[in-house]
Image (cartoon, helix red, strand yellow):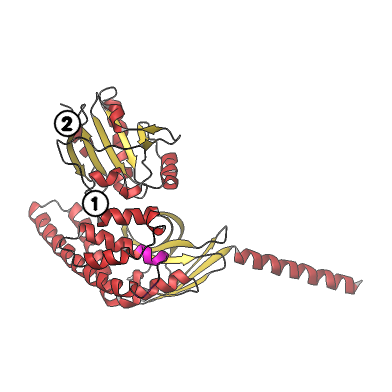
């Protein structure tokens, strides 16, 4: 009898251990040991879907360590971003790749989280760390610059003196110029490393970043090198959405100007029906290019709703998402968009590229004849109502 009980107990323990092992394989663990990081700051872990992140875990730093245990489903690799939040200021994000069973160890000597050391067996992480190693001192300077810009911008919003605001804006301009110079120097190192590596996920992410530099950095010195890297892509690789975005940044896309006829294309609603901007001729149209990951875009939605009520029957509102279908659908479920909610499903290389200034929210006002009257970017509370008050006179 005792022997039977003993074997029963051993069997139960074995089952528990097997169960625990199975559970451990269905999660990933991130452990961190840090020094000189402000106590009480939050560590926010985001799961990335394209360029949009969803918060999946938060920890407050107490002492010198932190830990995340995150359940996962499936066997694929997930891209994450870990940020420090100090009050309402966020750091640059540390890119991490994880899969079921991963145990990632981080060590850091300061608040510069982007360059913390990462110990991981995930292939993408090992490649990413090569780029970090190549430019660590420059990346640390870039992070320090980023913190200073954010602190200064916060102070600028609180400052009432016009004279002090002018001084702060001059300092911000100076920091932005330093940021641009640092990014160009980092890009030089990135290009040299990419020449040595095969085309894969991290390589494509870096190519996207370089292509953005080509498009938006004045007098960018490495256009030729970036185009040569793009030339390594196969015909099949060039047809991916990411590569098409890159190609649009590298090419001279014909953009629309004020007083010109509006650029148009097939636009889909959430049910898959096709529409075009020309369908709305006869009434003025306000186009709102937006994204789930754009804070100001989402802040503007209540004001867009007020505009739809105020100008009902006289103005057509069209919110054009530049997200992929998944992120567009998620955002649409969470926000009450009771006007036209459309997407050409081409991301940054679709209709947005024809009207783009590189920033969202991007607004375009069309006349009732379908001509561009005005275009502008950015949002602050009340700005749309004020602008529409003039345009609808």
Tell me where residue 111 appears, x and y as whole percent.
Answer: 33, 71
Q: Which of marks 1 and 2 is nearer the N terminus?
A: 1
**Residue under pointer 1:** 358
Who is closer to the viewer here, 323 or 306? Answer: 323
**Residue under pointer 2:** 391
Instruction: Please tell me whether residue 345 is drawn above or below residue 196 in the rendered image.
Output: above
Tell me if residue 340 is in the magenta stretch: no
Look at the numbered disc 1 and give the secondary structure of its residue.
loop
Tell me where residue 215 appears, x and y as whole percent.
Answer: 22, 57
Asked whether residue 110 is in view, the answer is: no
Q: In this picture, which residue range is highlighted in magenta?
A: 196-205
* Outermost residue, left side: 163
Q: Residue 342 carries which label?
A: none
Instruction: Please tell me whether residue 180 is drawn above or below residue 302 in the rendered image.
Output: below
Tell me if residue 197 is in the magenta stretch: yes
Q: How crowded is mark 2: few (under 14 residues within 10 Å), some or many (20 or more)?
A: some
Who is closer to the viewer here, 128 or 279? Answer: 279
Tell me where residue 138 appears, x and y as whole percent.
Answer: 26, 74
């Amino acid at each position: 009898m005792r022997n039977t009980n003993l074997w029963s107990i051993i069997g139960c323990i074995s089952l528990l251990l097997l169960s625990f092992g199975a559970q451990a394989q269905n999660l990933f663990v991130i452990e961190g040991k840090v020094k000189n990081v402000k106590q009480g700051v939050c560590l926010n872990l985001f799961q990335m879907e394209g360029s949009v992140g969803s918060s999946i875990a938060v920890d407050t730093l107490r002492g010198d360590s932190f830990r995340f245990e995150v359940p996962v489903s499936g066997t694929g690799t997930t891209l994450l971003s870990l940020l420090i939040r100090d009050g309402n200021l966020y750091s640059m994000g540390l890119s991490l790749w994880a899969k079921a069973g991963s145990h990632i160890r981080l060590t850091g000597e300061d608040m510069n989280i982007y360059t913390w050391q990462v110990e991981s067996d995930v292939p993408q992480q090992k490649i990413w760390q090569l780029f970090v190693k190549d430019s660590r001192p420059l990346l640390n300077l870039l992070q320090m610059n980023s913190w200073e810009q954010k602190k200064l911008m916060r102070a600028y919003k609180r400052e009432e003196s016009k004279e002090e605001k002018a001084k702060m804006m001059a300092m911000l301009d100076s920091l932005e110029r330093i940021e641009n110079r640092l990014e160009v120097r980092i890009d030089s190192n990135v290009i040299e490393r990419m020449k040595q590596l095969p085309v894969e996920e991290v390589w494509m992410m870096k190519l996207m970043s370089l292509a953005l530099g080509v498009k938006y950095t004045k007098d960018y010195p490495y256009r030729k090198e970036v185009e040569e890297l793009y030339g390594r892509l196969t015909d099949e690789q060039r047809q991916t959405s990411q590569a098409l975005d890159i190609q649009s940044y590298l090419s001279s896309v014909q953009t629309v100007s004020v007083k010109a006829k509006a650029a148009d294309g097939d636009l889909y609603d959430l049910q898959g029906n096709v529409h075009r901007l020309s369908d709305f001729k006869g009434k003025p149209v306000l186009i709102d290019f937006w994204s789930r990951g754009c804070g100001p875009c989402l802040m503007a939605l209540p004001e867009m709703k007020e505009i739809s009520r105020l100008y009902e029957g006289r103005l057509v509102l069209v919110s054009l998402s530049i997200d992929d279908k998944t992120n567009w659908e998620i955002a649409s479920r969470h926000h009450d968009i009771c006007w036209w909610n459309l997407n050409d499903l081409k991301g940054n290389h679709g209709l947005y590229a024809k009207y783009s200034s590189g920033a969202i929210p991007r607004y375009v006002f069309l006349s009732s004849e379908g001509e561009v009257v005005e275009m502008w970017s950015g949002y602050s509370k009340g700005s749309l109502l004020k602008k529409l008050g003039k345009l609808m006179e």
